[in-house]
Image (cartoon, rainbow, N blue to C red):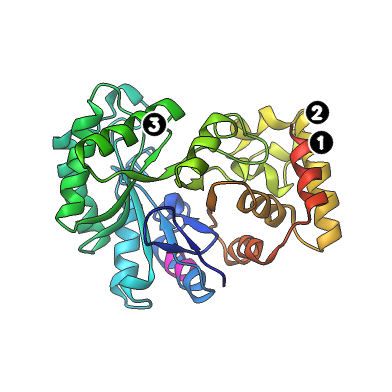
Amino acid sequence: MQKKLLGKSTLNVAPLAFGGNVFGWTADEARSFELLDEFVDKGFNLIDTANVYSAWVPGRSGGESESVIGNWLQRGHVAREDVVLVTKVGISMEDPFDMSKSSLSRDSIMKHVEDSLRRLKTDYIDLYMSHIDDEKTPLEETLAAHDELVKAGKVRFIGASNYSKDRLEQALKVSADNNLAPYVALQPHYNLYHREDYEGELQDFCVANDIGVFTYFSLASGFLTGKYRKESDLEGSSRAQLVQGMLNERGMRILEALDKVSDELNARPSQVALAWLIAQPGVVAPIASATTMDQLREIMQCATISLSDSQLQTLTESGA
């Protein structure tokens, strides 16, 4: 499988990341082990998680996903150095829905990184992400804390999630002015339906500054699989609230374009939607989750799809 170098780092990353939000939640530990084994056996290597997964579930306190990954690593199915581990810090594990309680202070970062390392059962994190911008804490403090971790060998590289272009630009300047480790990666909300958060000045900035981009909600909460096409398809679905707003004229245009290109390639809409993301400037790998082997095998095929210029145009224009 062709691998891509992540920006200014020395991380070789296959063009699909496994979203670990499901581990220990909708996929129990045994199922998670099976999925992770299959993922790496097929040549993929990036596993994305966060300390807060899955603190939003009643009775959970966060850290469940990291613990599952740590237990899986300990089994020895794959060598630690052959896996790229991404985890995040910043969102409150006590109240993950209240962004005012998020923190990227030095004390918070230093506490939570040790907890993450313990749960992941590893000596180092390949890519440590600031999960959400914390404007209460000076960028100098956040980046200096990250830099300490890099110098200590506990973190190899750092990145940011949910940062605007202006804040990402400020962060890079702080790192340059103070000789601190810079953000080399960004995780934005981006897919064929949701494009406003990344396309434009943020995308241009990431490309110009060699920032590797990993997209989350890459399949728009399942909408881009083509499973949901009318209101009745949402009955009994846990994704109803997330998907309902996409059942509009623009959403139908996007699904029609996905159907057209999928038919041309004898592929599935999910595979084409992910292949479109891979083809976008700046994108290193979309993040996607799966809870069954069939789902995982389906999305992994995105890496084998090559979209023609006309197919890319059809897809891009459908959601313009």
Q: Is the magenta stretch mostly helix, strand or loop?
A: helix
Image position, residue 276 (x, y; %): 68, 50
Q: Mark 2 points at which residue?
A: 249
Residue found 49% across the figure and 36% down from its top: 205
For residue 48, which quarter of the picture?
bottom left
Describe the element under mark 1 as helix, strand or loop.
helix
Residue found 23% across the figure and 64% down from its top: 122
Question: Is 122 colored magenta in this rendering?
Answer: no
**What type is the residue that disc 2 sits on?**
Glu
Can the viewer see residue 286? no
Q: Give the range drawn in magenta.
A: 32-36
Q: Name the residue under label 1.
A: 253
CA separation in Å, label 3 and label 2 = 36 Å
For residue 256, which quarter of the picture?
top right
Binning the other alpha carbons within 10 Å of mark 2 as few (below 14), some (14 to 19) or many (20 upward) gives few
Asked if the residue at tag 2 contacts the one at tag 3, i.e. Cβ–Cβ closer than 8 Å, the answer is no
**What type is the residue that disc 1 sits on?**
Arg
Q: Mark 3 points at which residue?
A: 169
Describe the element under mark 2 as helix, strand or loop.
helix
Mark 3 vs mark 2: in front: 3
**What type is the residue that disc 3 sits on?**
Glu
Asked if the residue at tag 1 contacts the one at tag 2, i.e. Cβ–Cβ closer than 8 Å, the answer is yes
Q: In this view, does 121 lie above or below 210?
A: below
Image position, residue 302 (x, y; %): 65, 61
- Left or right: 313 in relation to 303: right
